[in-house]
Amino acid sequence: MAKKKAVKRKARRKTARLKVAVIGVGSMGMRHCESVRKKIPEMELVAVVDANPAQAELVG
């Protein structure tokens, strides 16, 4: 029984999404944000920072 619980806990850890922040949202940073949001379901975009706040707002 204990082994079964350990396996369930391990499986739960594997499904947790990796939280990602992007620093700088020029052309490359924008592509990174798009990839994280649309192509990599195992990741979650949690923060975007840029020297130009208006540029960071474009990411949403």
Image: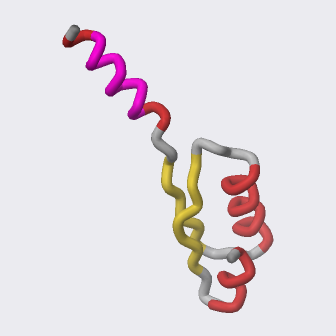
For the stretch drawn in magenta, what is the main secondary structure?
A: helix
What residue lies at 71% left-to-right and 85% top-to-bottom?
55
Residue 18 placed where, x, y %?
50, 48
Q: Position of residue 29 (x, y in %)?
A: 70, 67
Instruction: Please state the extent of the stretch shown in magenta in the rendering.
Output: 4-13
Pick the front one: 39 or 29? 39
Residue at image point 74% right, 76% down: 26
3 or 54, nearer to the observer: 3
Q: Quadrant of residue 58?
A: bottom right
For the N terminus, give its image quadrant. Answer: top left
Q: Horizontally, is 24 left or right of 17 in the view?
A: right
43 relative to 7, above or below: below
Residue 28 vertical position relative to residue 51 in the rendered view, above or below: above
Q: Which residue appears at 69% of the width and 63% of the height?
A: 33
- Position of 5 with respect to 15 (left or right) is left
Name which residue lies at 46% across and 41% down. 16
